[in-house]
Amino acid sequence: MSKPWRLQEITYKEVKEKKYEVAVLPIGSTEPHALHMPYGSDAFHAGMLADRVCERAYEEGAKVILLPTIPYGVNRNLTGFPLTMNVDQKTLDAVVRDLVASLEQHGILKLVLFNGHGGNEFKGLLRTLYGRTKVFVTLVDWWKVAGDVRDAVFEKPGDHADEMETSVSLALFGELVHMEDADDGAVHPTRFEAINEGWAQITRPWHLLTRSAGVGDPRKASKEKGERYIEVTVKRIAKFVKELSDAKIDKTFPFREDWNV
């Protein structure tokens, strides 16, 4: 049975009878995730978590529509690994701009970019779009939403294909995760203390940084930990989507009406 919040599954007959306030666009990437997780992990995370968000928001009365997932992301620094599929940020931005224009044409004036890949940087695009479209565009990096509970759930948080990301994967698509192949996710330090401490930044060439594209030890991961983290994340984002759906776009939007300058 089709889900009424999934655009890919519903018909024109259903769409023309509804008024949508918020569109959610999942965006991932196609890249290696260590030895134990699939290349599509970021796209799976974004699409599946956004689906759970939209389901909960829809059940709470939000007028929300889930758009198909964009499966490619900005991966230039992972191309040292075979079959990493890269699109430049300007290309990704152009696709999102065209989709924003489509939404504006169809009268949907609120968009959530549901980002699943740390290499995708949309803040510049948000600034570029401001004043050039009627669509209110907001960005959610899903893995940041429950950052305040991360250390309470996971023993060894890392950066990529780590305990957190692996646990979420086990909860969402565990049949594609091969824990028997997981390694320690060790990284190769640079020669510079400033870079190792993080206050001097570089683009990290991952084939030199890591053994297998993983950063952080995933071997303590579990489905149960993933579900705990997902529940907090989905609950918070769904609340935001519902509030966004209910909000009236007026001259002070998105700011509160009861504040005098």
Image (spheres, grey):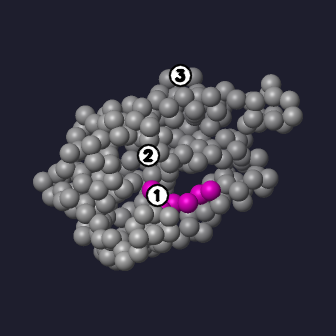
Q: Position of residue 79 (x, y in %)?
A: 38, 75
In the rendered image, residue 211 lying in the magenta stretch gets the answer: no
User: Closer to us: mark 3 or mark 2?
Assistant: 2
Point out the image quarter for the N terminus: top left
Dividing the picture into quarters, in which one does residue 159 lie?
bottom left
Q: Quadrant of the C terminus?
A: top right
Q: How dense is the environment of label 3, judged by Cα within 10 Å: few (below 14), some, or many (20 and up)? A: few
Residue sitting at the far front: 193
Q: From which residue to which does the magenta span run? A: 117-123
Do labels 3 and 1 touch, CB within 8 Å? no
Instruction: Name the residue carrying label 3.
Output: 60
Give the quadrant of residue 148: top left
Q: Earlier in the sequence, mark 3 or mark 2?
A: 3
Q: Is residue 71 above or below residue 107?
A: below
Q: Residue at x 53, y 71 (%)?
A: 88
The residue that mark 1 highlights is 118
Q: Which residue is mark 2?
A: 143
**Residues at marks 1 and 2 touching, judged by CB atoms closer than 8 Å:** yes
In the orientation shown, which residue stands out farthest toward the top? Answer: 60
The residue positioned 38% from the left and 62% from the top of the image is 30
Along the polypeptide, which appears first: circle 3 or circle 1? Answer: 3
Question: Percent from the top left, x then y, of residue 48?
Answer: 40, 42
In the rendered structure, which amino acid carries the disc numbered 2?
Trp
